[in-house]
Image (spheres, rainbow, N blue to C red):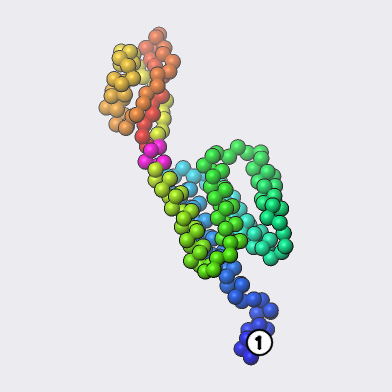
Amino acid sequence: MTDLLISQFSGGIDLGETKTFLIRFVLNMITLTILIRFLYYEYRKEGIPEYLFSFFLLGVIVFMICTALDMVDIQLGFALGLFALFGILRFRTQSIPVREMTYLFLVIGVSMINSLVNFSDPVNGIILYNTLIIIPVWILEIFLCNNTHKQKEVVYDKLEDVYQGEKHLRTILKDITGLNIQKVKIGKIDFVKQQANLTVYYRG
């Protein structure tokens, strides 16, 4: 009797499948938030704000499409073709940096896994898979953050230091700028103005 009342109240909706869908969706959004908001955009302060909107909504729509495709009899190749077509239509006119392209594939891959893979225990299975994806990204971000080299263009007006070589010049510039300079590249030298254009590479 109780089951009948629940069925009539829910309009014939399978509450078990709906609950599983909502759990998958929430876990997918949590994973996307960690990947996009905290690792991509916040961690190194090098994320492009315009991509946040696209990444989040792309993850949502990929999850929804995969869920819909899982309900019908369709070949996986055709489904992947739909995502490839979307990528061509949306991104073919704009050059995307490698890092952003990597996160784009991460968003698509994570959303597909969270939607399609049939785990015996959906909650623990999705958490395990997503954790195994997040941890390598986090480790790589830490590694890249600690090994990032930045560069600045400098006009230097003491040619006598330039003539003594890159090693001496690096020591002088370290004392002047206080930066952890790793390399100095000597560019154009103006003998009239007694100036040299330098490219300074330093650890961020």
Is residue 57 at least partly visible in the picture?
no
- Residue 14 image position (x, y, % from top left): 64, 76
Asked if residue 34 is positioned above or below residue 19 in the image, the reply reads: above
- The residue at 49%/58% (across/down) is 130
- Residue 41 image position (x, y, % from top left): 48, 48
- Residue 108 image position (x, y, % from top left): 59, 52
Closest to the observer: 150 or 190?
Answer: 150
Closest to the observer: 26 or 48?
Answer: 26
Residue 193, by quadrant, is top left
Please provide the residue range marked out in magenta. 144-148
Residue 183, by quadrant, is top left
Q: Residue furthest bottom?
A: 1
Q: Secondary structure at mark 1?
A: helix
The majority secondary structure of the magenta stretch comes to: helix
Is residue 172 at least partly visible in the picture?
yes
Q: Residue furthest top?
A: 192
Q: Is residue 62 left or right of residue 123?
A: right
The number of numbered discs placed on residues in the rendered structure image is: 1
Would you say residue 6 sits in the magenta stretch?
Answer: no
- The residue at 48%/48% (across/down) is 40
Q: Is residue 114 left or right of residue 10?
A: left
- The residue at 39%/16% (across/down) is 196
Other-residue count near label 1 (Cα within 10 Å), few / some / many at <14 / 14–19 / ≥20: few
Asked if residue 124 is positioned above or below residue 204 in the image, the reply reads: below
| Amino acid type, mark 1 | Leu
- Residue 70 image position (x, y, % from top left): 66, 63
Residue underneath mark 1: 4
- The residue at 63%/91% (across/down) is 1
Asked if residue 200 is positioned above or below residue 162 in the image, the reply reads: below
Q: Is residue 73 left or right of residue 189?
A: right
Quadrant in which the C terminus is drawn:
top left
